[in-house]
Image (tube, rainbow, N blue to C red):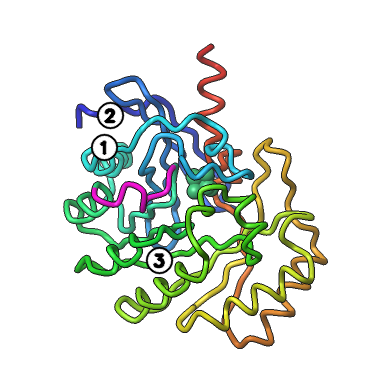
Amino acid sequence: LRDLRIAKKIETNSPAEWKTIKYLFETMDNKFFEAVLIFEDTLTLCVSSQIGCPVKCAFCRTGQDKFERNLTSWEIVSQVKLVEKDIGREIECVSYMGMGEPLLNIENVMESMKMLSKQYKLSTIGINGKIAELAKINIPIDLYFSLHCAKEEKRKRLIPFSKNYQLANILEEINEFSKKKGGVILWYLMLDNENDEEEDAKELVNILKKLNNIKLVILKEYCETGTGFKKSKVENVKMFQKKLENTGISYRCSISAGQKINAGCGQLRQQFMLEAR
Ligand code: SF4
């Protein structure tokens, strides 16, 4: 475990809310990144797979910082081991949803899955060829597809790295994945005046028609991170809900657990770096 140390942690203890602990790790080469422990029914650690993120989502604090490097498989495993040691309990589920796009570091991510023996969740914006690769690994994985915008041109603006791929090809690959590994969960981050108009909702329904095994759509409340984006108004979320009701696909609205400790994507690292100056 000498490849990492816990540099800082922040926790919430409010019993009415989700209890979470956010960890800031420092690597041997003095780089910083985060993981979040979530005390749900299943004890889940949301780990990082990269330091910074080359995907550069316009709404994400991590995306605004410089991309430094991929984490090694040992650095991913060490996040779990150090947190287990810190809390004196075993993590049940490892969620690859922290800093970074896990499928851009797929070798180390798959290696870490083989080293740990846990339940796994992984979220991706969709990287061509890599979803198929993930489907081949002989380990159950719950895949979360971060669509966030169903209109392709607008999506490319919100998620700049997605301009390297055709959405139609990603959807095909997700269908192939779900044939082998079961239903996929689709995430849609609700952003005020960006992706929450009636036309966006209609396009989302069209995309859902092309996907043959979506087990749940999550309309995610945006955690405002100082990037200038705002969360959608309640009436727009309701309008989306109404459109989804007619599809017969399960959906729910969700708020970010990290939001409760002012710790949306990249926020703790940012705060730490400012304090360190
Ligand atoms: S939202 Fe995820 S994929 Fe997008 S820049 Fe942030 S860490 Fe990367």
The answer, for residue 238, to whether it is visible in the render is yes
Tell me: 199 left or right of 156: right
Q: Which residue is mark 1?
A: 75
Name the kind of residue labelled 3 in the image.
Answer: Leu
Q: Which residues are magenta?
A: 100-107
Mark 3 surroundings within 10 Å by alpha-carbon count, few (fewer than 14), some (14 through 19), many (20 or more): many
| Secondary structure state at the residue bearing disc 3 | strand
Marks 2 and 3, Cα distance to the nearest angstrom?
A: 27 Å
Q: Quadrant of the N terminus?
A: top left
Q: Nearer the viewer, mark 2 or mark 3?
A: 3
Q: CA distance from mark 2 to mark 1?
A: 7 Å
Give the CA distance from mark 3 to mark 1: 22 Å
Residue at (51, 23) in percent of width and height: 272
Residue that appears at 61% across and 71% down? 252
Per the rendering, the mark at residue 4 is 2
Q: Is residue 254 magenta?
A: no
Q: Nearer the viewer, residue 188 or 34?
A: 188
Q: Position of residue 65 (x, y in %)?
A: 53, 31
Instruction: State the residue position of label 3.
Output: 143
x%, y% of residue 176? 36, 77
Left or right side of 131 for 209: right
Labels 2 & 3 near each other (Cβ < 8 A): no
Three-letter amino acid code at disc 2? Answer: Leu
Mark 2 touches mark 1? (CB < 8 Å):
yes
Of all residues, the one furthest to the right in this rendering is 235
Residue drawn where x is 37% and y is 24% of the image: 31
User: Does residue 115 sit above or below 141 in this rendering?
Assistant: above
